[in-house]
Each structure stands twice: as structure tokens, then as C-alpha cells.
Image (tube, grey):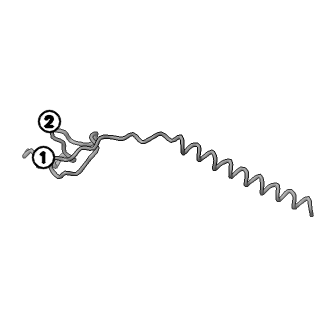
Amino acid sequence: MGRILFWILLGIAAYAAFRWWQRQGLRVKQRRRPEAISETMVRCDHCGINVPESEAVQVGARRFCTVEHRRLATGE
């Protein structure tokens, strides 16, 4: 009976150590996660909403959030 209890406790301890080791590895991976690349936000000249510069529709120096707002503002 003593040997069975010993092996059960050893198995529980090994499982707990394995789980602890896994969690430590995940924490290291989370810390090393690259920083998000920030992007400049620009204001729509029609409605005033802010959109990322890469998604803005640009006409000369004016920027718009959608093609529809460009059309409405420029009268096309």
C-alpha cells in the first residue's frame, strides 16, 4: 500500500512540475511578443472620424475615410 501511495504522489508531483514549467514558458513567450506597429491616424475632411493613414482615401492634401465621403466632399 505504501508503494502505491508513493507512486501516486510522485506522479502528482511530476504533473505539477510539468504544468509549472509550461506556464513559465508561456510567460517568457508573452514577454517576447513584438510590439504592435503603430500607425498615424488622420481625420476625415468630411465627417471628422479618424482612420489609419494607410486606409484613408487621399485627394491632394485632403483625406477621407471612404470613397463615398470623398465623392460627397468634392462634389464628383
In the image, taking residue 49 as reference, residue 71 lies left or right, namely: left
**Which image quarter is the C terminus in?**
top left
Instruction: Report x, y in % for residue 5.
Output: 87, 61
For residue 37, above or below residue 4: above
Q: Residue at x 39, y 39 (%)?
A: 37
At label 2, counting other C-alpha atoms closer than 10 Å, the crowd grade (few under 14, some 14-19, many 20 or more) is: few
Q: Residue at x 87, y 58 (%)?
A: 6
- Identity of the residue furthest to the top in this view: 60
Q: Residue at x 92, y 64 (%)?
A: 1
Instruction: Report x, y in % for residue 11.
Output: 80, 55
Frontmost residue, 42 versus 4? 42
Kindly identify the amino acid type of the residue bearing the numbered disc 1.
Arg
Q: Secondary structure at mark 1?
A: helix
In the image, taking residue 71 as reference, residue 26 lies left or right, namely: right
Give residue 29's quadrant in the image: top right
The mark that comes first in sequence, 2 or 1, is 2
Frontmost residue, 41 versus 60? 41
Kindly identify the amino acid type of the residue bearing the numbered disc 2.
Gly
Instruction: Report x, y in % for residue 35.
Output: 45, 41
Give residue 58's quadrant in the image: top left
Callout count: 2
At label 1, counting other C-alpha atoms closer than 10 Å, the crowd grade (few under 14, some 14-19, many 20 or more) is: few
In the image, taking residue 63 as reference, residue 10 lies left or right, namely: right
Instruction: Find the distance from the CA under tag 2 to the CA under tag 1.
Output: 14 Å
Q: Which mark is residue 7?
A: none
Instruction: Report x, y in % for residue 48.
Output: 19, 51
Q: Label 2, on which residue?
A: 60
Q: Label 1, on which residue?
A: 71
Q: Residue at x 63, y 50 (%)?
A: 23
